[in-house]
Amino acid sequence: MPLTVELIPCLTDNYAYLLHDPADGLCAVVDPSEAAPVKRALEARGLKLTHILNTHHHFDHTGGNIPLKQEFGAVVVGPEKDRERIPALDIGVDESAPWQFGSHMARILEIPAHTRAHIAFVFEGESIAFTGDTLFAMGCGRLFEGTPEMMWSSLSKLMALPDETRVYCGHEYTQSNGRFALTVEPNNSELQARMREVDTRRSQSAPTIPCTMELEKKTNPFLRPDSPEIRRTLGMDDADNVTVFAELRRRKDNF
């Protein structure tokens, strides 16, 4: 029986995700910034929380850990290499082994730079990836604890996932990310079409998540440092991909 994923809006623009395995009676929440919206979603569906999955240590992804664990006894799973900064962590994971969620296997990808030990949970059998704040729809995370080289390596790992992979990221940043993308690749017709759809969805207060890896590779400038148009816009025709990526990130930081 397939996993179901439900978006839970939190704070102002965060998403937590309810991951339900009806066959095994398991229910996880990914990156709960706060407990109350998660509890409301569980109550509405008659579900009991069994697991909490964290992609990284930031409080807007872990703030709900302790109250949810106290109420439900949920097992907290997160990056082993950031054990001391993940509240109430029970099981530390890394790339050396997958993590089992009932009958479903989650491949762990280590994708640092936003934080030094950021991870993604990739359910390959379901074509689902929880990317936290490393890969956003049409964007990527700020480099708080890493370098452009680290982030480009992390994004390259995610780009190697199958095109049909559905990406569930940490925030509803898509519209602002797309506006930046249009400044560096304004003639990308697929980007133009995507932004029309995004603007429509946001005008209706509808989420723009999930997206697919295929669409990201066609429209996300941070995955496209080899784009001739982006290179022309930046005046970096002959630069390597990491240097182009770094300039894109610098410009986005000041956008």
Image (cartoon, rainbow, N blue to C red):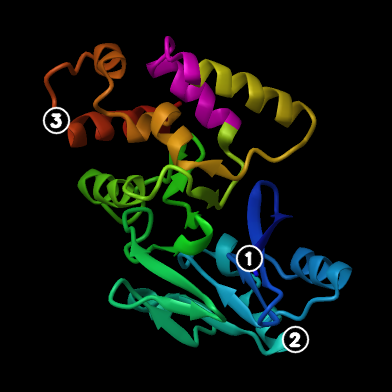
Q: Which residue is mark 2?
A: 71
Question: In the image, is 204 to the left or to the right of 15?
Answer: right
Above or below for 85 versus 150? below
**Is-magenta flag for residue 178?**
yes
Q: Which residue occupies 76% across, 81% down?
A: 48
Instruction: Give the image quarter of residue 1.
Output: bottom right
Which label belongs to residue 252? none
* Mark 2 residue element: helix
Say which amino acid is labelled 1.
Answer: Pro
Q: Determine the CA span between mark 2 and mark 3.
A: 50 Å
Residue on which the image places disc 1: 2
- Name the element at disc 1: loop
Residue lying at the far front in this picture: please name it. Answer: 1
SS for tag 3?
Answer: loop
Q: Residue at x 53, y 16 (%)?
A: 192
Q: Bin the neighbour count of mark 2 within 10 Å (Cα to Cα): few under 14, some 14-19, many 20 and up.
A: few
In the image, the segment drawn in magenta is 175-190
Could you tell me if the residues under marks 2 and 3 are in contact, i.e. CB atoms within 8 Å? Answer: no
Q: Can you say whether 117 is above or below 250 in the image?
A: below
